[in-house]
Image (cartoon, grey):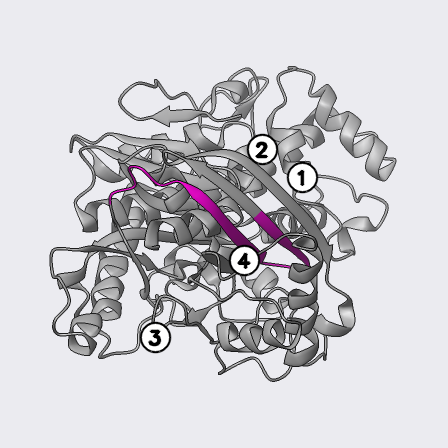
């Protein structure tokens, strides 16, 4: 399914589902939430204070925007350290009319690897064939480059078996931080997502793949190597020429956007003859924004964020992503609920709250979609999962914690996205292509983002459409190869 949420066309009521429970939510002028009530009774002090700590008011959003713009400028110039890498993708925006033919795509973003074959006619995908391969863990943890890319090459060979293939356009989505020196080169900066395969960091992944393909007699070479945000943006471009940002809000959080080549100083210095008026896709790696410096995040982070960061494998890094992504939202909620347990606002869940990942992220979706004043869904979920019968006040506390974690995630994401839109001057007419389970499956998430855009931009006119764009990592790789062929 594909849906659009537009600021210009949608009246937003993000907290509507809570109005039968909570008498009044925190306005900008009173961020301490002193007027919270439940059934005519004020919420416990612990909950009111927690609401304040999860609340992201407009003035803090403006602080984030100002600092992000500074970091983006530094990243484009390439002279100073910056928390957002602003990596040139070498994917140039071009006319997509009349693209026809067969294109291949590889998608490596986790332990499942995919190979796809796309058939295009007049720039539309008319046929897709794909296969998924589970990468053995010995290639992921402690394995070698030869083993990992050998497995990928063999998977490609198995996929094209019986087909005559000779150097077709091939797109490769490699969803890990990489520095690019050309369209078909990508040097791995660092592994993420539990990968630590040896011999890959600091090397060109396209070269490593080419060696293994050649060993197996596969006549294919990478046309374009991209990451999933670039693929998401290119995928939507083939549907809507107003697509200007590609975003992932799922297990991770990242943004890519179109930037004038003339503003990418570090690229112009490397290629002084480049067309300044051309438009290139920039992979921001913005999940790492303000990490580890916390110049503005120190005013947003709370003790539960700190606890989650301390227990993560990349402490001090990816701090913005840790407030937004589904990989961490459940843990933040768990830490907050543990705090309420210690303050005797709720009872324990049979000791499971003390266990890491003891409150999965999908529980948040189950709680925030509650539409029953008796909170039957929330109480039923807790009963089924933990064997605990919550009373209405306890269920309300759980429900509110989930709502606040989700709301803050959406507001942080929207603040980053809206700031990029303003930086690039797209606010008058902009389609933002978004993929990821948090955006797609969390009830009310797009509406919360649209409300945040209004708060960020105030009276400034804007028209930002949020569009669910599926499989940018797969189809987007093939379309990127088509775009650049």
Tell me: residue 428, above or below residue 483: above
Residue 305, quarter of picture: bottom right
Q: Is residue 17 visible?
A: yes
From the image, tell me which residue sits under label 1: 362
From the image, tell me which residue sits under label 3: 181
- Asked whether the residues under the numbered discs 3 and 1 touch, taking CB atoms below 8 Å apart as contact, a structural biologist would say no
Q: Is residue 45 visible?
A: no
From the image, tell me which residue sits under label 4: 305
Residue at 76% from the left image edge and 27% from the top image edge: 379
Disc number lying in front (3 or 1): 3
As measured in the structure, the alpha-carbon distance from the residue carrying label 2 to the one carrying label 3 is 36 Å
Q: Residues within 10 Å of mark 3 (few under 14, many from 20)?
A: some
**Which one is nearer the viewer's eye here, 244 or 254?**
244
The secondary element bearing badge 3 is classed as loop
Residue at 49% from the left image edge and 69% from the top image edge: 317
- Report x, y in % for residue 427: 20, 38
From the image, tell me which residue sits under label 2: 441
Q: Earlier in the sequence, mark 2 or mark 3?
A: 3
Q: Residues within 10 Å of mark 4 (few under 14, many from 20)?
A: many
- Report x, y in % for residue 273: 12, 71
Q: Residues within 10 Å of mark 2 (few under 14, many from 20)?
A: few
Residue at 67% from the left image edge and 30% from the top image edge: 366
């Amino acid at each position: 399914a594909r849906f659009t949420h537009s600021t210009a066309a949608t009246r937003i009521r993000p907290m509507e589902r809570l109005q039968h429970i909570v008498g009044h939510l925190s306005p900008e002028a009173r961020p301490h939430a002193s007027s919270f009530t439940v059934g005519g009774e004020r919420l416990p002090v612990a909950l009111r204070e927690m609401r304040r700590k999860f609340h992201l008011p407009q003035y803090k959003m403006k602080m984030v925007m100002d600092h992000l713009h500074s970091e983006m400028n530094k990243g484009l110039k390439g002279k100073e350290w910056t928390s957002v890498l602003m990596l040139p993708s070498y994917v140039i925006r071009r006319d997509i009319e009349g693209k026809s033919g067969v294109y291949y795509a590889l998608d490596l973003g986790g332990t499942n690897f995919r190979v796809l074959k796309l058939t295009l006619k007049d720039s539309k995908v008319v046929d897709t064939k794909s296969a998924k391969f589970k990468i053995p863990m010995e290639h992921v943890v402690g394995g070698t480059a030869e083993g990992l890319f050998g497995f990928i090459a063999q998977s490609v060979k198995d996929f094209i078996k019986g087909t005559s293939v000779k150097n077709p356009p091939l797109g490769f989505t490699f969803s890990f931080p990489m520095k690019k020196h050309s369209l078909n080169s990508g040097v791995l900066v660092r592994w993420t997502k539990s990968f630590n395969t040896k011999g890959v960091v600091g090397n060109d992944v396209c070269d490593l793949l080419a060696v293994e393909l050649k060993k197996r007699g596969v006549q294919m070479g990478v046309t374009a190597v991209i990451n999933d945000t670039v693929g998401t943006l290119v995928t939507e471009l083939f549907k809507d020429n107003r697509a200007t940002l590609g975003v992932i809000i799922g297990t991770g959080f990242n943004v890519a956007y179109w930037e004038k080549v003339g503003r990418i100083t570090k690229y112009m210095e490397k290629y002084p003859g480049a067309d300044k008026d051309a438009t290139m896709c920039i992979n921001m790696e913005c999940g790492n924004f303000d990490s580890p410096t916390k110049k503005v995040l120190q005013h947003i982070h709370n003790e539960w964020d700190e606890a989650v960061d301390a227990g993560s494998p990349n402490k001090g890094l990816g701090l913005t992503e840790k407030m937004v992504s589904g990989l961490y939202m459940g843990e933040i909620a768990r830490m907050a609920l543990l705090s309420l347990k210690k303050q005797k606002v709720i009872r324990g869940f049979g000791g499971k709250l003390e266990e890491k990942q003891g409150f999965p992220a999908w529980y948040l979706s189950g709680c925030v979609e509650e539409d029953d004043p008796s909170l039957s869904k929330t109480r039923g979920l807790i009963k089924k999962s933990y064997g605990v019968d919550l009373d209405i006040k306890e269920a309300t506390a759980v429900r509110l914690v989930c709502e606040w974690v989700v709301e803050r995630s959406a507001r942080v994401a929207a603040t980053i996205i809206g700031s990029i839109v303003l930086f690039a001057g797209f606010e008058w007419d902009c389609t933002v292509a978004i993929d990821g389970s948090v955006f797609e499956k969390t009830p009310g998430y797009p509406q919360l983002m649209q409300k945040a855009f209004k708060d960020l931009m105030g009276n400034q006119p804007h028209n930002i459409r949020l569009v669910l764009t599926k499989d940018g990592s797969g189809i987007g790789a093939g379309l990127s190869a088509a775009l650049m062929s």
